[in-house]
Amino acid sequence: MKVELQNLTKIFPNRNKKIKEGVVAVSDFTFTVPDGKLVGLLGPSGCGKSTTLYMISGLQQATSGKIFFGDEDVTDLSPENRGVGLVFQNYALYPHLTVMQNILFPLQNLKGKDKLPKEEMIQRAEEAARLVQIDELLDRKPNELSGGQQQRVAIARALVKMPRVLLLDEPLSNLDARLRLQTREEIRRIQKETGITTVFVTHDQEEAMSISDMIVVMKLGVIQQVGEPQEIYDNPINLFVAKFLGTPPINVFRGCVQNGKLYIGEEAVLDVAGVEDKPVYVGIRPEGFTLDENGPLTCKLSGIEVMGRDVSIISTNENSTNPSVRSIINSDNKVDATAETVKYSLKPHKVFVFDAETEERIYF
Ligand code: ATP
């Protein structure tokens, strides 16, 4: 079931009565979630991810715009009638009910023609439990489960009604680092097995990159870029997106273009023929540096971290906007830890140039 969002806007009334304009949480959001895909909504806190998700679910009414599930216009449908499964950050399980009763709950609430015979309810609940691998735990109460297991119960409960669309709002936030990894792989597996169109909200770029078929990067309620995770990482449209994706983060330098050459300080680091002269930001991915004693970029060496296959070199450069410059190179390269400076040449496809004023990408 594809989900089409057309010019969705949400404006909340301003609590401060003296200010007439409302709070624009989401602005003119147009995007289609392809059938059967997992899409990650990604952005910093307050950028409108949850509001977008709640508009898809029907928990919040859009101020303007339309929502279609397949060909059906669901904009004015109530949440119960949209056929969505919702999973929140806090699992919101009923503490006095067993796992089985928690999963059964949404089915027991079905009314009229949707009501199911008891055997079918139990069969569906057992199937959902098997899918999320908690079928051994059906008699336990939520407080007898780990955080990860509780989140699986919440997912099973969302799946049991066979939703048309699955919506996950920061479902991993309450889990520790190891469980986060494991549970995100689980979510991916479950999503692939069921083929349910899924929208996943997170502020964690690594999480979004690792499990999404596509990601939507948002800032202040506005879509910045949409695409496959690797495509966005390799081709960010502006400085915000470039900085938001990648660990370690991209290195950003103040620079300028002069006579077809890209300068960081006095050093001409790359040919950018055809680009007009202007001040710019230069973004260099950590893997975009090559150790080269004749290379054009000089940094002051401050430390080396060996990480097995790779070596991370930490250095400084007065034009860097970050306190330190971090490059990652293959550990076959020998770095002289006693040297004062380190010299690099740059891999052009890992270097992005942005207009210093608009922060939009300048292609070269
Ligand atoms: P987070 O990751 O912190 O949950 P988010 O990206 O999900 O953030 P939203 O919760 O969608 O962001 O909020 C978007 C904007 O709308 C924020 O500026 C928020 O303060 C505002 N907002 C959200 N709900 C309301 C509301 N009920 N009334 C007024 N403003 C709201």
Image: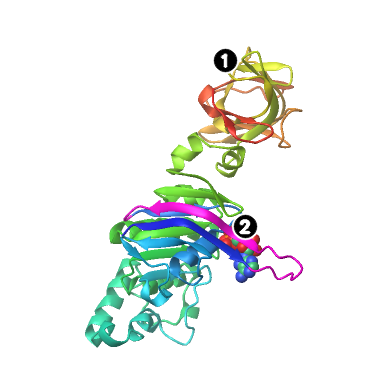
22 inside magenta stretch: yes
> Label 2, label 1: how many angstroms apart (C-alpha)?
39 Å
Residue with the mark numbered 2? 45
Viewer-side residue, 67 vs 249 = 67
Q: Is residue 202 magenta?
A: no
Q: Is mark 2 within 8 Å of ligand 1?
A: yes
Would residue 172 be visible to someone looking at this image?
A: no
Disc 2 residue crowd, few under 14, some 14–19, many 20+, Cα 10 Å: few
Q: Is residue 179 above or below residue 61?
A: above
Q: Element at badge 1?
A: loop
Residue at 60% over, 35% down:
360
Where are the magenta residues, as a range? 13-36
Of the numbered discs in the image, which one, if any, rests on residue 273? Answer: 1
Q: Quadrant of residue 111?
A: bottom left
The amino acid type, in three-letter code, at marker 2 is Ser
x and y percent of residue 61 in the render?
A: 50, 70
Looking at the rendered image, the disc whose residue lies closer to the viewer, 2 or 1, is: 1
Give the residue at x 63% y 12%. Answer: 294
Percent from the top left, x then y, of residue 229? Answer: 45, 43
Q: Is residue 317 above or below residue 161?
A: above
